[in-house]
Amino acid sequence: MNFISIDDVSAEQIQKIFDIADRIKAGKMEVSVESNSVMVLLFEKPSTRTRISFEAAMAHLGGKSIYLDSLTTQLSRGESLSDTAKVISGYANYLVARLKKHSDIVELATNATIPVINALTDLEHPCQSLSDLYTVRDAKKALKGVRLAFVGDIAANTANSLMLAGTKMGVDISLIGPKEYPPNPVYYTKAKEYGSVDVYSDPKEGLSDVDVIYTDTFVSMGQESEAKQREALFAPYQVNAGMLKYANDDAIVMHCLPAHRGEEITSEVLDGPRSVVWDQAKNKMLIEEAILLYLSENEIE
Ligand code: CP
Ligand code: NVA
């Protein structure tokens, strides 16, 4: 009943979520959740896209959203996550949580009796990966055999979820980043079981024959104290015009946003003709709508 990790969904389930999104997009689907459905968003970290897109998705489905900044709840005064989960389950139909620690969302889900959806933790960003792959499929008309390079912080939450989601769906993954920040071994090992994933420290080598160049911030939320030491190590991995030359001529550029212009990506590339970042951001709402509908009818185990 939960969507905590991208590994909670199989390739078939991802395909079903994409089918629902296609039908919503084509206006071919009756879109509504059970009447009077309530979605609680419990966030410990800032958000622009994920919060708004989930709230907008729920509005389209005819339900209501309640946004809770964890600082204004009794969690800030020591109430346990397990008690909070039990109480919210009595009021709402969905709990969407953005928490610092992945183990905390697992605890929330263990104690909730409603579906819990991960809106980002230190380890994962599974809803993001689904909308990212949906965007790739739109742009490249396929997923199987497409080569996607994640450039920069290949140890980040976005990279963890995307390497699993991608390999499940037949996307070949290149992880390109500094040796000092290797991929998370748990996610990397699993991704290798699912499909093709290779690690490179040389962008030129890693970008050969690449169809999609993906990047994210070099300093994720919660890593601010490492900003200085990361700066020099990640600088060679900036996605800029020179970097694009190593990939296929029709390679698209993606970024989950927020972007740090001039750091992990230049404005020239972000605003350039190869960038699909605004479609990518827009697709979050569509896929979240599809996830909510899917969860209301099916169990994701
Ligand atoms: N991509 C993404 O999750 O953005 P927000 O942090 O603004 O939600
Ligand atoms: N890796 C980034 C993603 C932001 C959407 C972070 O965790 O801050």
Image (cartoon, rainbow, N blue to C red):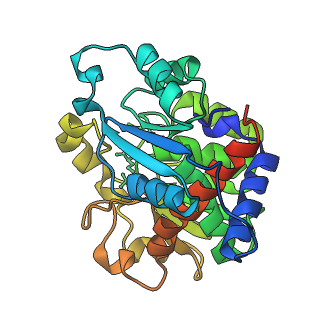
- Observer-nearest of 93 and 271: 93
Give the left or right position of residue 270, taking residue 86 as reference: left
Image x and y of residue 277, in percent: 45, 71
Give the left or right position of residue 202, taking residue 134 as reference: left
Image x and y of residue 229, in percent: 21, 40
Q: Is residue 69 above or below residue 59?
A: above
**Residue located at (67% from left, 52% from top):** 293
- Marks counted in the figure total 0
Give the left or right position of residue 189, taking residue 205 as reference: right
Give the left or right position of residue 240, taking residue 251 as reference: left
Q: Is residue 67 above or below residue 15?
A: above
Q: Is residue 161 above or below residue 4?
A: below
**Residue located at (32% from left, 80% from top):** 268
Image x and y of residue 13, in percent: 77, 47
Answer whether residue 197 is visible to the viewer in this image: no
- Observer-nearest of 137 and 39: 39
Instruction: Give the image quarter of residue 9.
Output: top right
Q: Quadrant of the C terminus?
A: top right
Q: Quadrant of the N terminus?
A: top right
**Residue located at (62% from left, 70% from top):** 211
Image x and y of residue 276, in percent: 50, 75
- Observer-nearest of 99 and 154: 99
Q: Is residue 37 above or below residue 300?
A: below
In the displayed orientation, state which residue is furthest to the right.
Answer: 12
In the displayed orientation, state which residue is furthest to the front.
Answer: 36
Answer whether residue 42 is visible to the viewer in this image: yes
